[in-house]
Image: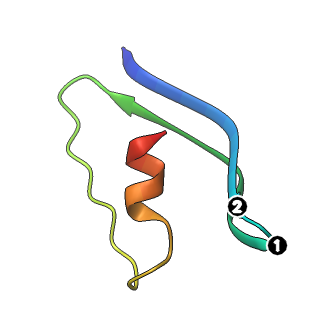
Amino acid sequence: MNLLSVENISKSFGELVLFKDLSFGINQGQKIALIAKNGTGKTSILNI
C-alpha cells in the first residue's frame, strides 16, 4: 500500500535545476533516507 506517491515533480531556483521529473513512492512500513551532498535539494523535496 502506497502512503505517498510523487510523480514528475521539478524544482529550480532561476536557471539552477535541483531536480526534474522526480518520481517515487513510499509504502506502508517502509523506511527511507535521503542521502546526498549539501545543496542538492534534499530539504526542497521535503518542503514540496
**Judging from the image, what secondary structure is the residue with disc 2 in?**
strand
Give the quarter of the image for residue 28.
top left
Q: Residues within 10 Å of mark 2 (few under 14, many from 20)?
A: few
Q: Is residue 40 above or below residue 29?
A: below
Q: Is residue 30 above or below residue 19?
A: above
**Of residues 18 and 26, which is closer to you in this image?**
18
Q: What type is the residue that disc 2 sits on? A: Ser
**Of residues 36 and 29, which is closer to you in this image?**
36
Mark sitting on residue 15: 1
Left or right: residue 42 compared with residue 9: left
Q: Are marks 1 and 2 in contact (CB under 8 Å)?
A: yes
Left or right: residue 22 compared with residue 41: right
**Judging from the image, what secondary structure is the residue with disc 1 in?**
loop
Q: Position of residue 33 (x, y in %)?
A: 26, 58
Q: Is residue 20 above or below residue 13?
A: above
Q: What type is the residue that disc 1 sits on? A: Glu
Give the quarter of the image for residue 20.
bottom right
Mark sitting on residue 12: 2
Which residue appears at 47% of the width and 50% of the height?
A: 45
Which residue appears at 41% of the width and 24% of the height?
A: 4
Which residue appears at 39% of the width and 78% of the height?
A: 36
